[in-house]
Image (tube, coloured by chain):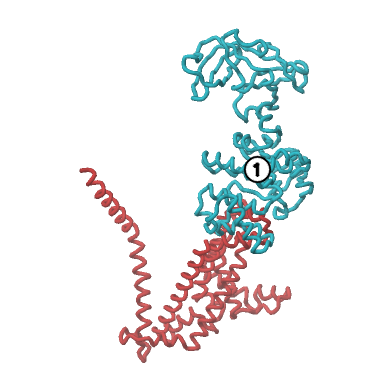
Chain colours: A red, B cyan
């Protein structure tokens, strides 16, 4: 009897287990469906919808017109400008964050925690307010501008330029680069570096051949965390870029609010999402192979 | 075949020192890890640094490798002062306790790393890698990552990765520590054979006295940062000079005694023993005798030329190949190890006995 009953019991237990798991996840699933999946569905639907002459979006006569317009030079210019600003911000963040993360992860544990808290301090105040603070600093008689002129750094009047946008993005997203890098570097077994040094590697060679490849997961995670929000950034370019030169984020907002072209705004949103998704997948794939 | 193997004692007669430590001290803050150490390791020798964990043996090894710098003192390799030289500029390689294999490189890349760093050209490198992988019997595993290897296989790769560089001195930091007993014993033999085959000086750090005794030409016993005794395994075992060394290596009995003249000590019961020592009259010492060097006789039946102590047999434990007798004498208990005899011939608890030993099997130790 028991021999027959055992597998049945096991199956029942497994089913109960998965039911419990489902129930635990349910609130978050409902939240994500209502506020993420459905809105995303609406955006995708809009991108194939028809724009009436009065600027209303009507869900009929499904077409690809909005996607065809993505090829227009204005849209392409906006997308490429966003792309290079995001790439530049990511690379600058990486260049600044790597040595810092390396420094933090090689300190004593107590010092490490203190420094990590210091990295996270900016999160304690609002992003918008901090970005406005930069506007004050970058003003023509702002502190940054005057100091730049004083130390012979050239013309420090960069407000409302791409430089100011990149500065703001780097400032805002640097912690997102530091933290994953720290986590990755901190995990590295230092006896591997000693092993490399013992096998005739100079300090630089040991870094290039051992530390760097092993910290790659952190580089990838940090780059995604900085690149993705930089590419679609809206607040920073709006405040520091003066929006004279449109970026993807503000261009999408413009389509919905001013140009009243819902389908184009939606199709551009879908393209941005697709680019980020593909980029992320490719990056992860590559990272996975190297580990 | 056997004739081609280099005779280690032949190599040891060459007078050059592979490694020479003079007055080496290493402090970490207030902690003295290594305390004024002098040591010469002969070329071609299999030398073990033996001691309990925290005795400074690994720190000593790391100072030879250049992974730590001595607070004081000098490290010379083949007569050359190492000074501030970084590890990559020293003619030594290390097999780490954790192996430290690069997880993102396959076996071949791991083994070839040192050659690559020294810019050995590709063809030569491939040849050397193949030689080293063959040497440790890892042929066919060249494209595996360390994560796909067992502990024993990783250990072999770590060994190949170091040996492929043909270092003047190979430093091994408890390389067998992570392996199970059977594999460890097998690797002990293989390591020793390998050392003979390649003729490189091995400096081997271990806390396992059996391992050290099995493999080494000479052993240095360390305790609390100091080198207590450097000698052949046999001398360390048979003629320890300190209580710590006698106790750390094998089991032993300590009979408290006092020095009375150049070649006499007085035991706690007033017995006089003819044993020479360098210590001043009145120094408190101990006479150490290994359990297997003691013989048990019926009371009064021990031969006259041996030293004799009367006692009562307290217990007998049968171990299969031996019997351990615990014998209570006036002021302490002695442990005696005898070859096992059949049940009828065994002594039993309560028997009046005499324990005897040859004077040359006893040593005077201090500390």
Quadrant of the rendered image containing residue A19: bottom left
Residue B349, position in %: x, y? 50, 13
- Residue name at image x 22 percent, y 46 percent: A4
| Quadrant the C terminus of chain B occupies | top right
In terms of depth relative to the viewer, which is nearer, A9 or A155?
A: A9
Residue B98, position in %: x, y? 58, 48
Identity of the residue furthest to the left in this view: A1
Label 1 element class: helix
Q: Chain of mark 1?
A: B
Query: What residue is shown with label 1?
Result: B58
Identity of the residue furthest to the top in this view: B300
Up-down relation of residue B18 to residue B232 (above or below): below
* Mark 1, other Cα within 10 Å: few <14 / some 14–19 / many ≥20: many
In terms of depth relative to the viewer, which is nearer, B365 or B211?
A: B211
Residue A274, position in %: x, y? 44, 76
Observer able to see residue A111: no
Quadrant of the rendered image containing residue B2: top right
Up-down relation of residue B364 to residue B350 (above or below): below
- Residue name at image x 40 percent, y 80 percent: A266
| Quadrant the N terminus of chain B occupies | top right
Up-down relation of residue B187 to residue B239 (above or below): below
Q: Is residue B269 left or right of residue B184?
A: right
Residue A109, position in %: x, y? 59, 51
Observer able to see residue B294: yes
Identity of the residue furthest to the bottom in this view: A53
Count of numbered marks:
1
In terms of depth relative to the viewer, which is nearer, B44 or A228?
A: B44
Q: Is residue B258 left or right of residue A91?
A: right
């Amino acid at each position: 009897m028991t021999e027959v009953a055992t597998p049945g019991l096991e199956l029942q237990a497994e089913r109960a287990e998965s039911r419990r798991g489902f129930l635990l996840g349910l609130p978050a699933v409902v939240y994500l469906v209502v506020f993420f999946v459905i809105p995303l569905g609406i955006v995708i639907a809009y991108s194939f919808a028809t724009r009436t002459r009065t600027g209303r979006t009507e869900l009929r006569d499904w077409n690809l017109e909005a996607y065809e317009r993505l090829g227009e030079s204005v849209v392409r210019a906006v997308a490429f400008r966003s792309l290079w600003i995001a790439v530049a911000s990511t690379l600058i963040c990486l260049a600044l964050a790597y040595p810092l993360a390396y420094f933090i992860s090689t300190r004593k544990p107590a010092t490490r925690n203190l420094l990590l808290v210091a990295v996270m301090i900016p999160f304690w105040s609002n992003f918008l307010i901090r970005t406005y603070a930069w506007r004050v600093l970058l003003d023509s008689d702002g502190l940054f501008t005057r100091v730049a002129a004083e130390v012979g750094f050239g013309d420090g009047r960069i407000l409302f330029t791409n430089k100011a946008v990149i500065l703001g993005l780097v400032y805002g997203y640097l912690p997102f680069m530091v933290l994953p890098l720290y986590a990755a570097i901190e995990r590295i077994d230092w006896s591997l570096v000693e092993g490399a040094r013992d096998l005739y590697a100079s300090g630089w060679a040991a870094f290039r051949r051992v530390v760097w490849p092993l910290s790659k997961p952190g580089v990838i995670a940090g780059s995604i965390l900085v690149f993705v929000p930089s590419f679609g950034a809206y607040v920073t370019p709006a405040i520091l870029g003066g929006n004279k030169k449109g970026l993807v984020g503000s261009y999408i907002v413009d389509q919905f609010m001013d140009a009243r072209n819902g389908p184009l705004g939606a199709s551009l949103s879908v393209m941005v999402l697709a680019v980020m998704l593909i980029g992320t997948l490719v990056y992860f794939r590559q990272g996975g192979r190297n580990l | 075949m056997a004739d081609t193997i280099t005779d280690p004692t032949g190599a040891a007669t060459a007078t050059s020192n592979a490694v020479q430590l003079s007055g080496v001290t290493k402090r970490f803050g207030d902690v003295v890890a290594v305390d004024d150490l002098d040591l010469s390791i002969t070329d071609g020798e299999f030398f073990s640094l033996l001691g309990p964990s925290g005795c400074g043996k690994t720190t000593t090894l790391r100072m030879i490798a250049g992974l730590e710098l001595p607070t004081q003192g000098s490290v010379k390799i083949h007569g050359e002062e190492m000074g501030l030289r970084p590890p990559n500029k020293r003619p030594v390689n290390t097999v780490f306790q954790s192996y430290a294999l690069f997880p993102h490189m396959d076996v071949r890349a791991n083994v070839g790393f040192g050659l690559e760093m020294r810019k050995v050209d590709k063809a030569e490198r491939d040849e050397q890698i193949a030689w080293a992988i063959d040497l440790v019997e890892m042929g066919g595993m060249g494209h595996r990552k360390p994560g796909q290897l067992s502990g024993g296989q990783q250990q072999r790769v770590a060994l190949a990765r170091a040996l492929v560089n043909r270092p003047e001195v190979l430093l091994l930091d408890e390389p067998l520590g992570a392996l199970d007993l059977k594999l460890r014993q097998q690797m002990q033999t293989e390591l020793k054979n390998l050392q003979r085959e390649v003729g490189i000086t091995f400096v081997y750090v271990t806390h396992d006295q059996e391992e050290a005794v099995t493999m080494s030409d000479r052993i240095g016993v360390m305790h609390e940062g100091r080198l207590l005794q450097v000698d052949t395994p046999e001398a360390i075992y048979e003629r320890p000079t300190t209580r710590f060394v006698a106790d750390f290596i094998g089991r032993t009995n300590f009979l408290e005694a006092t020095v009375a003249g150049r070649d006499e000590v007085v035991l706690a019961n007033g017995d006089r023993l003819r044993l020479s020592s360098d210590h001043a009259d009145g120094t408190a010492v101990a006479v150490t005798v290994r359990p297997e060097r003691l013989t048990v006789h019926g009371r009064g039946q021990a031969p006259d030329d041996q030293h004799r102590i009367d006692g009562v047999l307290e217990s007998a434990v049968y171990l299969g190949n031996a019997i351990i007798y615990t014998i209570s004498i006036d002021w302490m208990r002695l442990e005696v190890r005898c070859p096992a005899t059949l049940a009828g011939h065994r002594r039993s608890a309560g028997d009046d006995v005499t324990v005897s030993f040859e004077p040359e099997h006893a040593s005077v130790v201090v500390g």
